[in-house]
Image (cartoon, grey):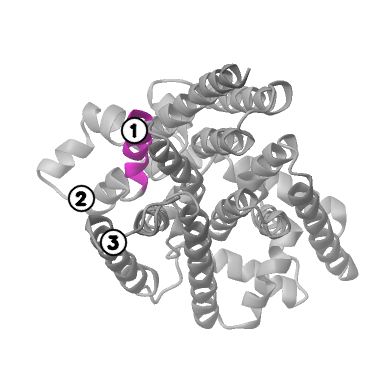
Amino acid sequence: MRPKSTFGPWAWTGFALLLLLVARTALLDFGRAQPGPDFPTVWRWSAAFVGGGNPYRGINPYLPSALLLTAPLGLFPIAVAWYVWKVTLWLLQLGCLVTGYRYLKQRLDRDKAFVACLSIVLLDGFSFRVGNPGVPAAMLTYLAVVLVLMPRPTLAGVALGVAVSVKYNLSLPFLFILALARKWRTAGVAVVLVCVLNAAALIALAARGIALEEVAASLTRGVRVVGGLDDSGFERWFAAWNPNRFQLLSFSVALNDLGMSSSSANAVCYGLLLLAIAVVAWVLVARPGCDRDLRLLGCVSAIAPLLLTCTYNRFYNTAILGITAILAWELLRRGNRRLALVVFALLTPFLIPISNTIQQHSMGAGVMKRLLESPWWRFCIAPHHMYALMVLGWVLLVWVLRSDRAGCRERQ
């Protein structure tokens, strides 16, 4: 039986976090009148899709289903569409907040659950001041995992299906993990929804004479360039000469700064991610089931930071780290205070992107300029969030292996 909550320190902490969330929403999210980064491109593709144009002329890394889902934005002028986007994502943020609270209230007392869900939504990825489809995709992926744990498998499948349809490279690994965990209804609903949405979008494109080959070629070029998989894309986003490279989460940036070539850096990062997914697959498939929900939460929580840092991602994709934060609260509830505090500490850079903020607002002369040009900044301070994600992922993966083995021994 959960202890009764009183209006004590946890309640006051929750109230303070709620004020912070309201302030961020009002000042940063709704306070920006001009369309955020990437939104003009998204709106242009949406307008082309609904207006009979060709959104796959040139480079476009998004599936046809993403264009279908964002098509309503193309019905409005860009200024109006920007507010429609923000209101939609605000409602999605509220949905994540309420769903997270309902789940956590089953595990914690009411005040702690209130603090936990608010601290999760304060992660930078739950802000919607950026117009990239990765923002709703990351929120929906977090929502899908929480719904699986509640359990609400059908709703989870819908959320995950929309997430994959919007930005597949961010959400598809979680669909794979849920299938390995035998969450068949969730995985099945998601796959069907992705197939139906893409089929509908491709039919609409074919009706105006846009061939499947053209769509595939545009997608392939988009993935290679935007993902930094070829030299031109890597030079554009990851290269050591680019002063904005630390706005990324990708560990390739740190490796390239250390002198590694673009192909080697990508090979190391993708190799580490595939190794982690292989370990998770072995844990979920080959190991006997003990505490299946905790094991699934641990596996997803380990993959989330590794996915963010081993592929092309930015701070606006970090809503998926809300899954890892839920694991930290679960560890705290179970008495594993040391690991919980380690996880919380490694998640701190994604509440306030420190190096990103400093670099954007301190490009002038003086002490800050010397800091930005120093080796300490380049190799230690600026990429600290990349190191945090890499360490967090592997620490949790080791914990999953050890805790699963220990839990099985206890039950034998």
Callout 2–callout 3 Cβ contact below 8 Å: no
The boundaries of the magenta stretch are 338-350
Above/below status of 333 relative to 360? above
Q: Position of residue 323 (x, y in %)?
A: 51, 45
Q: CA distance from mark 2 to mark 3?
A: 44 Å
Callout 2–callout 1 Cβ contact below 8 Å: no
Q: Main secondary structure of the magenta part?
A: helix
Callout 3–callout 1 Cβ contact below 8 Å: no
User: In the image, is 368 to the left or to the right of 249?
Assistant: left
Q: Residue at x 22, y 28 (%)?
A: 376
Q: Secondary structure at mark 2?
A: loop
- Reading the image, the residue beneath label 1 is 337
Amino acid carrying label 2: it is: Ser
- Reading the image, the residue beneath label 2 is 362
User: In the image, is 149 to the left or to the right of 260?
Assistant: right
Q: Secondary structure at mark 1?
A: helix
Above/below status of 301 relative to 31? above
